Image (cartoon, rainbow, N blue to C red):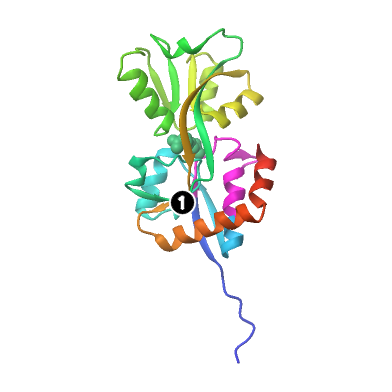
Amino acid sequence: ALSGFTVMAETYVVGTSAGFPPFEYIQDGEVVGFDIDLMRAIGESQGFDIEITDISFDSLIPGLQAGTIDIVAAGMTITEQRAQVVDFTDPYYSANQAVLVKEDSGHNVTVLFGDNRLAVQTGTTGDLWVEEHLQDTGILTGNVTHFDTFVLAVQDLINENVQAVVLDTPVAQRYAAENPVEMIAELVTGEEYGLAVARGNTELLDKLNAGLQDVIESGVMDELLAKHF
Ligand code: ARG
């Protein structure tokens, strides 16, 4: 009989977009966060390894389509539009959008109106929300700056180049805890995050859903939530 074999585990390329703490952010030159730990736990459960690649948020879905990445783990909201081009797992986190302003600026929710300047991350649900509800309706006439990362958007806010940033609530809270910025309003959008794979990749999708379920049932999910939130 044959012996001494080690079956090499499959390695999947996981695309993310850091600057979205506590889900994915850079610490000591490394991409860390809840999504990264979640992917590692799912990989452990399902017997695969992962390799993280950090790219701009609006390149993630094209990356899945081009086959340069296998999985998106980026706090990505499951939307109807995205679900037409990629396949999502079961949801793993719920969030809304939030309005972040500079600390002590005295701004309230009217900061979203008139000639105020806002910042968003390109291609996010916050970007779309601002376009649909504020720009297309003419409520907002000021400029909206599109950034590749929220790190840059929040920096622009601190520098007073924009009056507000629209981003996911848990991430707004984390930025507010660590920077001279504050969250002044929550926009109840009722979003749910999912992991995404290329459309039709049911083999991988099934593994991810089985892994998610295992991570939840084993209590690992609660440990990760306690660690990161
Ligand atoms: N949940 C929002 C969306 O899906 C924002 C996600 C941004 N994620 C990131 N890793 N920067 O559009």
Q: Circle 1 — which element?
A: loop
* Camera-nearest residue between 133 and 141: 133
Mark 1 lies on residue: 89
Q: Is mark 1 within 8 Å of ligand 1?
A: no
Q: Residue 80, position in %: x, y?
A: 35, 41
| Horizontal and vertical percent position of residue 48 | 55, 63
Which quarter of the figure has residue 217? Answer: bottom right
- Residue ID at (66%, 52%): 220
Residue at the spot 65% in from the left edge and 25% down from the top edge: 177
How many labels, in total?
1
Horizontal side of 167 relative to 229 (left or right) equals left
Image position of 46 with respect to 181: above or below: below
Above or below: residue 56 compared with residue 2:
above
Q: Is residue 62 shown to the viewer in this render?
A: yes
Q: Which residues are magenta?
A: 15-41
Is 40 within the magenta?
yes
Corner quadrant of residue 35: top right
For the point 65% across and 42% down, the residue is 225
Percent coordinates x, y for residue 213 in the rendering:
56, 55
Q: Assign the C terminus to one quadrant of the image.
A: top right
Q: Position of residue 66 (x, y in %)?
A: 35, 53
Query: For the point 46% across and 11% down, which residue is it?
Result: 111
